[in-house]
Amino acid sequence: MEVHRALTCVFISVFLWTGDAQDSVPDSVLNCCEGDVLFLLDSSGSVASYEFFRMVDFLKDLLLPFSLGPHQVRVGLLQVGTEPHLEFSFETYSSQDGLQAALGRTKQLKGDTNTVDALLMARNQVLKQGVPGGARSDLPRVLVWLTDGVNPGEVQEPMARLREEGVAILVVSTGHGNYQVLREAVSPPAEEHLFFVDIDDINIISEELRNAIIEIIRAERLQVKSVTSTTAQLEWRPVLAGTGYYDIQFGPIQTGQTTGTGGSGTSPGTGLGPFQRIRRPGDASSANLFGLRPDTKYTVTLTPNTNLESLNSLHATFTTLPEMQPSEVETLSTVTVSESSTNSVRVSWSPLLPNLIQGYTLEYSALPTGPLRVVSVSNRQTTTVLTGLQPDTQYLVTVSARQASGRERAMTVKVCTQEVLPALSDLQLTPVGSESVQLRWKGRYDGLRGYWVTWERGQSQRSTLYLPPNQLSTTLNHVPSNARVCVSPVYRTARGEGLCCTA
């Protein structure tokens, strides 16, 4: 059973011990995707006002981590009512501030549930490539339909047409809609693209739905970050699954010549000056480039190498910053946290300046009054893992960059470790009639919010049910022979490990 990880909470402040405090904007949480996502929001009278505002809040949380813009993710919102209403198109917002404010201003239409006309508008005006304000060519297009499931209309044909035209369709139902109709609407696999959830518990599926969207619009590209006058950081999506290795070549582009590739050393006539080659293991997703020339345009090529299949190389160009005096260099601009667990968290920072920085110091303590712990890190590191932490606890972490001159710059973040998620125990299934089973299990753990029940209905169909924490049994109907039934505990921040049985 998959364990869904909690989002890490972060608060950042910056201190410059030899000067005034300065603000810093960290890298986006997600910067790996490129595509157009249209949300079809049921705004009809069958949706209660409370349910509508819960859906809007869910969208705000779902979309918050995405980087928006022409070369990132674009979002549109189309409301379903008696007449469909395009709240905003893909080109309207390129920042989270604008998008979040627009979602907050969204008003319910009421009226009839005219989903068919809304789908026609989605196809002809929004998701169609080449029309003003429409989807971009050669990029993934996604339609996410949020509905209460009441009287959706004859949506099978327009949904099928969208799928045939390459639009990926996902559905979230907060009511008791026709399972077969909704299952036929989504793009396969249905078990990953169709969600049934009670409106009060809709945030439980945020991570699953977001990951499903990411898998569709994830961009295969090489990103260059944290560029300084002499260093740069590469990031890419891992494609080797721990096998093979990545070959990285980088070198300056000579002015007035064309870009090319070649072997080690200088490549005359290709437009490249002396270049370097480094290798990273198959489980890597980043690399640091050192010894670059200031104010120089570079080209870099990353080639995945594996004996199993042929993979395309990724290319990027970037320009290093002009050379600056040590007093002008921002020695610490971003601090981020990732890989949070119950007792550890990874802390990363940038830029990497080994020629200016003597080393890094990390000071951390549990809030409000935990003991202070200190870790020293090499000047060639930009990440480390803090271990031995307490579960479900907030920590204050300060990263300091020390220069030879005595000047020091520091940034502080607040991070949260995950809560302990006890696994379910003692799941029992008892037949009740020909196609019904009774489930019983043991629970009642600290922090428990409820239980998530899933079961197979044949032909790759799957149903889900959410139960309150005080309910330790339920009866499922229309369960075919040999169907797999699973129960997982749901906690404040994530879903715990569950148990599965065969009916």
Image (cartoon, helix red, strand yellow):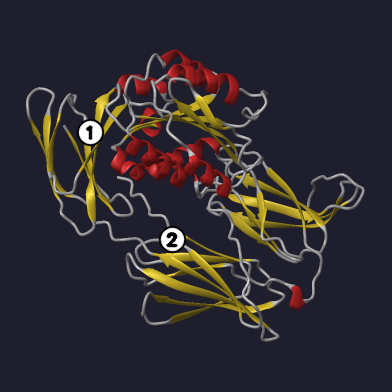
Quadrant of the snapshot with the N terminus: top left
From the viewer's perspective, is residue 10 above or below residue 109?
below
Quadrant of the snapshot with the C terminus: top left
Q: Position of residue 387 (x, y in %)?
A: 40, 70
Locate residue 212: give its quadrant: top left
Locate residue 140: give its quadrant: top right
From the viewer's perspective, is residue 57 above or below residue 49?
below
Q: Secondary structure at mark 2?
A: loop
**Figure disc tally:** 2
Residue at 38% x, 16% y: name it: 153
Q: Nearer the viewer, residue 56 or 411?
A: 56
**Amino acid type assigned to the residue bearing label 1 in the image:** Arg
Sooner in the amino-acid sequence: mark 1 or mark 2 = 2
Residue at 58% x, 19% y: name it: 124
* Mark 2 lies on residue: 9
C-alpha distance separating marks 1 and 2: 36 Å
From the viewer's perspective, is residue 147 above or below residue 152?
below
Query: Few, some or many C-alpha atoms within 10 Å of disc 2 (few <14, some 14-19, many ≥20)?
Result: few
From the viewer's perspective, is residue 224 above or below residue 473?
below
Residue at 42% x, 82% y: name it: 372
Q: Nearer the viewer, residue 271 or 461?
A: 461
Q: Is residue 275 left or right of residue 338?
A: right
Q: Position of residue 454 (x, y in %)?
A: 25, 36
**Amino acid type assigned to the residue bearing label 2 in the image:** Cys
Tag 1 and tag 2, C-beta contact below 8 Å: no
- Camera sees residue 127: no
Instruction: Tell me, for residue 484, which label it has, or none.
Output: 1
Q: Position of residue 39 (x, y in %)?
A: 48, 32
Q: Is residue 424 left or right of residue 364?
A: left
